[in-house]
Image (cartoon, helix red, strand yellow):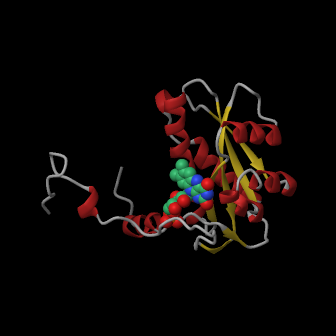
Amino acid sequence: MARVDDAAEILEQINKVRQVRQYEDKPVPDDVVNQLLEVARWTGSSRNTQPWHFIVVDDREKLRQISQLRTPINWVADASLAIAIVLHGENENSEAYDEGRVTERIMIAAHMLGFGAGTAWYGDDPLREKAKEILGIPAERTARSVVAIGHRISAKDPRPNPAMSGRHPLSEIVSQNTFGATRKG
Ligand SMILES: Cc1cc2nc3c(=O)[nH]c(=O)nc-3n(C[C@H](O)[C@H](O)[C@H](O)COP(=O)(O)O)c2cc1C
C-alpha cells in the first residue's frame, strides 16, 4: 500500500485523542454512529474470532443508570450515547485485549469525525452484573465497559480526583535491544 498522503496529520490527530468526559447536550447523528460501528466491526481480534456484540445505548435512563454504577463514571450520564461492548465470554485474556483494541479504534474514529469519546468501566463483578441487567445482556456474556460518545466540550478531567495528564517521555519508556539500555537515535 502506498504511503498515506497526510500521514503526518493523521498521526498528529491520533496523538491528540483524549478521554472526553464533558459533552454538550446534542445528539450524535446516525451516520456518525454507523461509521463508528463500521470501524468497530473491522477491528482485528484474536484468531479473527470477532468476539463482540455492540449495544448502541441512547436511552437517557439507561445512560443514567450506568453512570450511577460508580462515581468515577458519573459523567456517562452527559454523553449523547454509549456503545456498550459485550464479549462472548469464551476467552478472558484474548477478549480483554480485543476489547482494548476496539475501544481505542472507536475513540480514534470519534475524534477524527470531530466528536469526543471516553471509556467507562463498570467496575467489579457485582457492578458488571448490574450493568448486564440494565442492558439485558445474557448471563454467559462478559460485559466490562462502554465507550461514551458526544460533542466534546473539553477533555479536562472534571472529577475530584483527576487522573494524571500528559505522558512519560520516550527516554523513560523505550530501550534498545536490552531492557534499560539507552536507545540511540
Ligand atoms: C482500563 C481503563 C479503565 C478506565 N476507567 C476509567 C473510569 O472509570 N473513569 C474515567 O473517567 N476514565 C477511565 N479511564 C480513562 C483513563 O483515565 C484515561 O485513559 C487516562 O487518564 C488518559 O487520559 P487522556 O488520554 O485524556 O490523557 C480508563 C481507562 C482504561 C484504559
Residue 105 in view? no
The quarter of the picture where residue 71 lies is bottom right
Examine the rendered structure and indicate whether residue 160 appears above or below residue 105: below
Q: Position of residue 20 (x, y in %)?
A: 61, 66
Tell whether 176 sits left or right of 114.
left
The quarter of the picture where residue 73 lies is bottom right
Q: Position of residue 9 (x, y in %)?
A: 42, 70
Residue appearing at x 57%, y 63% in the figure: 19
**Which of these two is toward me, 149 or 10?**
149
Tell whether 13 sits left or right of 19.
left
Residue appearing at x 43%, y 65% in the figure: 15
Q: Quadrant of ligand 1?
A: bottom right
Examine the rendered structure and indicate whether residue 91 appears above or below residue 28: above
Tell whether 91 sits left or right of 184.
right
Q: Position of residue 178 (x, y in %)?
A: 15, 45
Residue 167 in view? yes
